[in-house]
Image (cartoon, grey):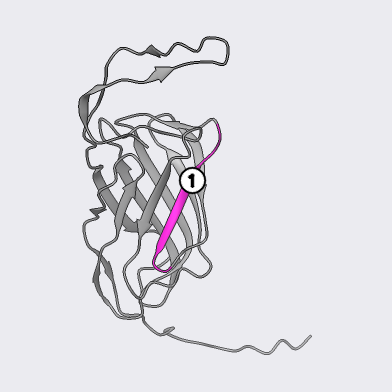
Amino acid sequence: VNPSPGTSYTLNVTTTSDITPVTSPQYTVVANNPITNVSNGIGTPSAAAGAKTQYVVNFTASSTGGMSGGADSRMTVTFPSGTDLSQVSGSVFNVTTGQSVGNCFAPSGQSIECFMFGGAVINPGNQVRITFSEVVNPTTPGSYQLSVSTTSDTAPVSSPQHTVVDDNRLPTVTLAVDSD
């Protein structure tokens, strides 16, 4: 984990054979930036209250927001209260490179943390899509939003609102008895 932003950091290196410390050139740690272009859409099949459906979350990593599996980078999506996440699965896709780069853990409360595969990379400025399957919409119709953060872009950013609509009954149910 990087220290606070600054411009005068150095590090010292020694080995068991070369015990005199050698100091690195100065390096800079810059302030992190928020992710941008966060969007959320209730995917198919339904935006109805209480319906099991799919959510698609998109965002753009910031100019300082690179992530990698080697750094154990993570993304956290926090869903609105009332959303049932008990059977959710999720996958992470780097839209910019066209590669599947990770999956998601089981939820903890209303948050789901997603991880990256070992050699996977999301470069600064890449567009990312996280698809969550088997999400159950809140049972109360209304406008909702979720938030997204990453281990590189740590400030949570809220999505625009999405709408959960009233559920409807099946229009007609019929029964036919087969004579065979």
Can you say whether 43 is above or below 85 in the image? above
Examine the residues drawn in magenta and state their main secondary structure. Answer: strand
Give, as a single range, the part of the protein colored magenta.
109-118
Residue located at (51% from left, 70% from top): 86
Q: Label 1 crowding class (10 Å Cα cut-off): few <14, some 14-19, many 20+?
A: many
Measured from the top left, where is residue 103 in percent x and y? 52, 48
Magenta stretch: includes residue 117: yes
Magenta stretch: includes residue 179: no
| Figure quadrant of the C terminus | bottom right
Residue located at (35% from left, 51% from top): 57
Measured from the top left, where is residue 82 in percent x and y? 35, 76
Q: Report helix, strand or loop for mark 1.
A: strand
Q: How many marks?
A: 1
Kind of residue indicated by mark 1: Phe
Residue located at (51% from left, 38% from top): 100
**Is residue 6 shown left or right of residue 92?**
left
9 or 111, which is in the foreground? 9
The reply to whether residue 44 is visible in this rendering is: no
Can you say whether 87 is above or below 117 in the image? below
The reply to whether residue 51 is visible in this rendering is: yes
Measured from the top left, where is residue 155 in percent x and y? 25, 49
Measured from the top left, where is residue 87 in percent x and y? 53, 67
Give the residue at mark 1: 115
Q: Which quarter of the picture shows residue 6? A: top left
Can you say whether 157 is above or below 136 in the image? above
Can you say whether 85 is above or below 3 in the image? below
